[in-house]
Image: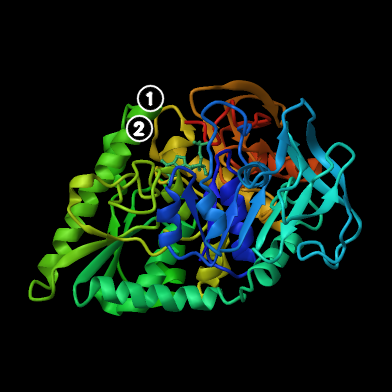
Amino acid sequence: TVLVVDFGAQYAQLIARRVREARIYSEIVPSTMPVAEILAKNPAAIILSGGPSSVYAEGAPAMDRALFEAGVPVFGMCYGFQLMAQTLGGTVDNDGSREYGRTELTVSRPDSTLFEGTPVKQDVWMSHGDACSAAPEGFIVTAATDGVPVAAFENDAKKLFGVQHHPEVMHSTYGQQVLEHFLYRGAGLKPTWTTASVVEESVAAIREQVGSKRAICGLSGGVDSAVAAALVQKAIGDQLTCVYVDHGLMRKGESEQVEKDFVAATGVQLKVVEAEERFLSALAGVSDPEEKRKIIGREFIRVFEQAQAEIVAEAPGDQPVEFLVQGTLYPDVVESGGGTGTANIKSHHNVGGLPEDLEFQLVEPLRRLFKDEVRMVGKQLGLPDEIVQRQPFPGPGLGIRIVGEVTKERLDLLRDADAIAREELTAAGLDTEIWQCPVVLLADVRSVGVQGDGRTYGHPIVLRPVSSEDAMTADWTRMPYDVLARISTRITNEVADVNRVVLDVTSKPPGTIEWE
Ligand code: XMP
């Protein structure tokens, strides 16, 4: 394992992903973790991330010398680089020299471990105030920029390396190569972490955890729960039952996809619960978004518990159902401050939020993976592209894409409009460029239109195409006008009661991706 010490500001996750792209497993630890504890994890190498602090600021995170003296290869980036310099006796000036953004780096030692085979002049991404002016003793300086005399250094004998820039961001043209040079050459690691090895290890771990007991898994139709279920199914077969609650808030063809495609691909035992009426009557008369979310969550839990009771009743002699499979991902684990300890079920969950008193032990086979890795594991498991490449879709479904009361008629109307938009986006080859494109019905708004010589008084449909890496922030997608035009024409022609299509051009923040 390569440990990435997180000095804040979101760089650590990106670095961990890049290390994994080099096929070496990596994990993130907080910079507050004592060095003894870090070393006790027996890391094959350590990377110190960038961060927002100045090494001179009061209370800035520091690093115990012992980390650099343990014989473990260390690579410092940006803040991590300066920290390495300062801790080992180099000089870091806080003289107001700054570099931000794309900067030209001049490599002075093209034979160095990190830069061998890369051009003497290369673009790198900088973001720093302080700068290193003298490397620690025993280090050679390997690169500089106009503003920074010591922009990279290394001490090959001690396996210590550092760069002022951010090799993990894509604007650093040779960043991945520099990182891989550290991993393969500097630290002597081999690229053995593959999707196949992930599947193999997960299957063994799940078998060990669950033993001969039974497990259940709520399927939402989303990628995470599907891949988690497929992994567990591979490990324990029919000891797993998946529960799919059809709440009537799904998009066109979605339930069929879960019922047919997923079962066909995995052979999983599936229990489908038809609960449309139950959900719609609970939602009748409600238009407040939070209230809708709560009702959907509550009804979901009831149905789920009932399904669970039925599963037990149907085969009472079998082993008890003690495990609940969850599609928790690594970013959730990192963001909830952890890695270890008890897992809480998130309320913002893809099946609508399961209560903590469900009293299950959790099986979370994806808790070490990023989203793109989950997709690769899904592919490895033979899941079809329609499931693996699916864009995110919220647990409360179309219920939070109707601004106003949710009724069957409105859902049908929105389903039609949404299906048209999805069809055209797919036909235009935009599915991977667009992170997701909610289609929203403004049910409480009417506007005047004209169609076939007659006046209309219909509802607007909002298109909300966004680009994002993780849904935490997003920008509206600049998609081709002709595709927008086709979607607009088709929706207004084919969907009764819709006489206007509008485009949401708000980033997140300030707007969220969903409208409710
Ligand atoms: P917002 O609207 O908060 O959405 O910008 C961020 C991402 O989360 C999805 N989303 C949900 N996913 N249960 C989910 O599983 C939910 O209740 C929920 N609400 C929003 C949304 O589609 C986007 O990808």
Residue 198 visible to the viewer: yes
User: Picture quarter containing residue 366?
Assistant: bottom left
Q: Residue furthest left?
A: 317
Residue 151 locus on image (x, y percent):
79, 46
Residue in the picture at 86% in, 63% down: 118
Of helix, strand and loop, which one carries label 2? helix
* In the image: residue 365, left or right of residue 324: right
- Near mark 2 (Cα within 10 A), the count class, few <14, some 14-19 or many ≥20, is many
User: Picture quarter containing residue 513?
Assistant: top right
Q: Which residue is mark 2?
A: 292
Please state which of residues 454 and 41 is positioned toward the viewer in this rendering.
Answer: 41
Residue 373 locus on image (x, y percent):
55, 63
Label at residue 288? 1
* In the image: residue 235, left or right of residue 321: right
Q: Are marks 1 and 2 in contact (CB under 8 Å)?
A: yes
* In the image: residue 374, left or right of residue 163: left
Residue 390 visible to the viewer: no
- Near mark 1 (Cα within 10 A), the count class, few <14, some 14-19 or many ≥20, is few
Please state which of residues 336 and 177 is positioned toward the viewer in this rendering.
Answer: 177
Measured in 3D between alpha carbons, the distance from the residue under mark 1 to the one under mark 2, in whole angstroms, is 6 Å
Residue 103 locus on image (x, y percent):
85, 42
Vertical order, 235 against 440 (above or below): below
